[in-house]
Image (cartoon, coloured by chain):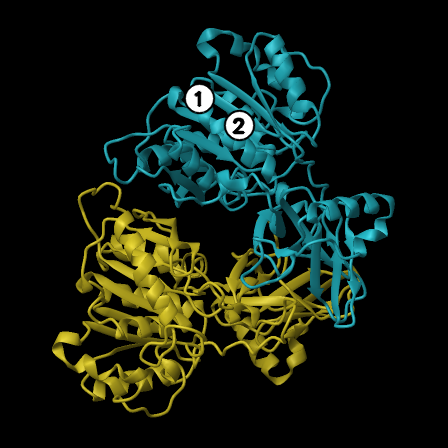
Chain colours: A yellow, B cyan
């Protein structure tokens, strides 16, 4: 009954946008991303979201999520809006209060687009693989390390598998796993729930116990500016006008400015820092297996571009490579033909040579993002470079695409 | 020269409040709590803080920190204010934009008062003890555990000392360390920098290597409401009017509602959960030493009240007890005489009996908070119950008081 009512409401609303202001069917439940005890944002069974905001003297309040949703002020001085149905998964959003863009105080905040956003999570009926279960749990730990390249302390998070502490003679392979543009080292466990994905895969015998190192890909040498973050324009900048934020995914890998361009892809500073500072710290602090057969690197969006840059320039150090909604240059999300001889900085032809080939080249994307990853994977396969392609049905450039990608990717590593 | 100019500005401003609108001496530096690349909030050498906020269409914008500071809109549509000098250390604050209370998008956010606040950190010239240094580093790890008492998964953070992974036969004593009202399990490492305090003490040979377990003291049984958080009133509540938030510290331990009052102090639900769920999980997952001689418990503010409640009701399980700006009932911060026979739920007289005494009873407070902790410590000592008293000069009910307290407290444990 409830499903039918929701479906009817959906059809009715397609005809008249204002219909969303009506009460949707069923009861709404607080988003799991809310602060403790906050009832709103509240999500209906059909994915409509009711937001409520206290802003008694404001003239205009909007929810910034997708196209934006104007709120109406009620007699109780609380602003509210019920949105059209949202797709399942994790969505960043923010409030606009008389022109100020801020996080909703009703939710926990998540580092994205260079600041601490609010977010909702539309429940996923198939989400058990990223939820805690009665299985042995690994641990996500802070790992501080001093970077000589950036001359500052940096923080990574490291997942160690459930048996790491008890199996004290064992050594483990390592996946280096990166976040996307405007995110940081907290993304994969806070937004991505990677620890539960790995715990569940390992408990099921589907993935090998491994370490997962989640670093911050934003790497600025002393004196360089970090244009990635300052670009947002929501935070006052003292000097020059803010630049346009880079588009996520397509082309996001380009233009890090000074230093370290390698192979034409442009994220050499991170690669240099990684080999100078991060990898030695990990291999000193943890019991890891050596060599390329025991190292993988992957990332999402701009992190995928970084993984392609780093691995294609260092195939002697890695044997597994993944790009979730991002790989090299425009070939992560955008479409169009390309020339294997020249694309990706000219670093692809080496993959046809047995000595410099990779055991796994993995490309994934959400079906709502475009055809770029498929085009790229097809072209690689046609050129004799085997590539695995995975697509996440019905999801966009968002964390549910990347949770699904990790769940599909991790079992393919170190086998 | 600069110091003299700042001192003159300070004197001038005492005479005329509007003087703070003038440019302070010296250059301001971005707060270390800012998001990457954000220039504001910016802190002058004398502790004045310049805030800037983009809110083009707002009518009124204020900084909520202490007495509150009205901002002025400049010709560039950016609102700004320069505050009077702030004391050194970490201060939560928020923005009020046309009546909406929100976090400043320019800073990282910190869970306090039940939501994700913004914060500034006024530099502390003596802050090296809570900064990373070239010493061996311990690790702070997420520890998920299922709670039978609350029927949900809970997260604690666990600090393991630098040699935990290499000294694989060793077992360690454990300090259970709690946050304050409206905070959570992230407080001690994010706001408190406890990992660097412990690393530095252990490296100097001043503290024994130990585990530190940082749990979330907010413990709600199925069906109970969590009035602690809903009380804030900034987030829309659907039903009854919000209650007054409990005062921090004094009296904050009271009135958790249903279930588990023990000895009249009122935080029995957490104590029950701790012994049913948390301690068994820690003792199963980590190499810890057994027995009361190897267990300590401390907390700040409401967490201090919780530590007193739990330990005084279970002196067979702990031998070390600390309350930073909070202990039992009104005796943490408030003053006034009390009767050792009846105060703290009548649980104090047992501490005079050798079999049920504690090796350490520790009370601390910031000098700007009041005399309560000193009054309490003096009375305990007068009654023949030895108590250590520590005060943090010039600090209030804030994290710098608690960082200093931990730095003074940890060396006294497990010796």
What is the chain letter for disc 2?
B
| Residue denoted by label 2 | B307
Residue B276 occupies quadrant: top left
Query: Is any atom of residue B152 visible in this view?
Result: no
Of the residues under marks 2 and 1, which one precedes in the sequence? 2
The 10 Å Cα crowd at callout 1, few under 14, some 14 to 19, many 20 or more, is many
What is the chain letter for disc 1?
B
Residue B224 occupies quadrant: top right
In the image, B49 versus B340, the foreground residue is B49
In the image, B81 versus B105, the foreground residue is B81
Image coords of residue B179 (percent x, y): 55, 38
**Secondary structure of residue under mark 1:** loop
The 10 Å Cα crowd at callout 2, few under 14, some 14 to 19, many 20 or more, is many
In the image, B224 versus A40, the foreground residue is A40
Query: Is any atom of residue B66 visible in this view?
Result: yes
In the image, A87 versus A288, the foreground residue is A288
Image position of A243 (left or right of B75) = left
Residue in the image at 65% along x and 74% along y: A69
Please tell me whether residue B257 is drawn above or below residue B343 in the rendered image. Answer: below
Residue in the image at 36% along x and 31% along y: B209
Please tell me whether residue A265 is drawn above or below residue B165 in the rendered image. Answer: below
| Residue denoted by label 1 | B318
């Amino acid at each position: 009954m409830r499903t039918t009512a929701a479906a009817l409401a959906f059809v009715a609303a397609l005809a008249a946008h204002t219909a969303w202001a009506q009460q949707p069917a069923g009861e709404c439940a607080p988003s799991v991303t809310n602060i403790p005890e906050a009832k709103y944002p509240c999500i209906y069974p059909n994915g409509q979201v009711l937001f409520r905001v206290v802003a008694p003297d404001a003239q205009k309040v909007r929810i910034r999520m997708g196209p934006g949703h104007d709120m109406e002020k009620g007699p109780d001085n609380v602003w509210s809006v019920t949105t059209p149905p949202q797709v399942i998964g994790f969505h960043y959003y923010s409030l606009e209060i008389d022109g100020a863009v801020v996080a909703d105080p009703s939710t926990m905040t998540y580092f994205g687009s260079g600041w601490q956003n609010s977010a909702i999570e539309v429940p996923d009926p198939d989400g058990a693989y990223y939820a805690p279960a009665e299985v042995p749990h690994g641990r996500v730990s802070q790992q501080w390390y001093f970077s000589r390249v950036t001359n500052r302390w940096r923080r990574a998070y490291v997942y160690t598998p459930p048996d790491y502490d008890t199996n004290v003679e064992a050594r483990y392979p390592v996946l280096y796993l990166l976040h996307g543009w405007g995110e940081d080292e907290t993304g994969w466990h806070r937004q991505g729930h990677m620890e539960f994905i790995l715990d569940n895969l390992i408990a099921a015998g589907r993935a090998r116990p491994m370490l997962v190192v989640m670093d911050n890909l934003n790497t600025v040498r002393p004196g360089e500016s970090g244009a990635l973050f300052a670009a947002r324009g929501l935070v006052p900048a003292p000097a020059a006008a803010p630049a346009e934020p880079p588009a996520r995914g397509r082309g996001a890998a380009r233009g890090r400015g000074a230093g370290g361009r390698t192979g034409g892809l442009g994220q050499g500073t991170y690669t240099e820092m990684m080999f100078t500072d991060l990898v030695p710290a990990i291999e000193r602090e943890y019991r890891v297996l050596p060599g390329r057969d025991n190292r993988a690197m992957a990332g999402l969006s701009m992190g995928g571009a970084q993984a392609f840059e780093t691995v294609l320039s260092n195939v002697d150090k890695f044997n597994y490579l993944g790009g979730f909604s991002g790989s090299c240059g425009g070939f992560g999300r955008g479409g169009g033909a390309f020339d294997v001889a020249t694309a990706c900085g000219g670093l692809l032809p080496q993959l046809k040579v047995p000595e410099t080939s990779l055991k796994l080249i993995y490309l994934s994307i959400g079906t709502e993002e475009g055809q770029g990853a498929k085009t790229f994977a097809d072209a690689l396969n046609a050129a004799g470079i085997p590539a695995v392609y995975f697509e996440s049905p019905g999801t966009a450039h968002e964390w549910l695409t990347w949770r699904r990608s990790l769940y599909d990717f991790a079992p393919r590593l170190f086998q």
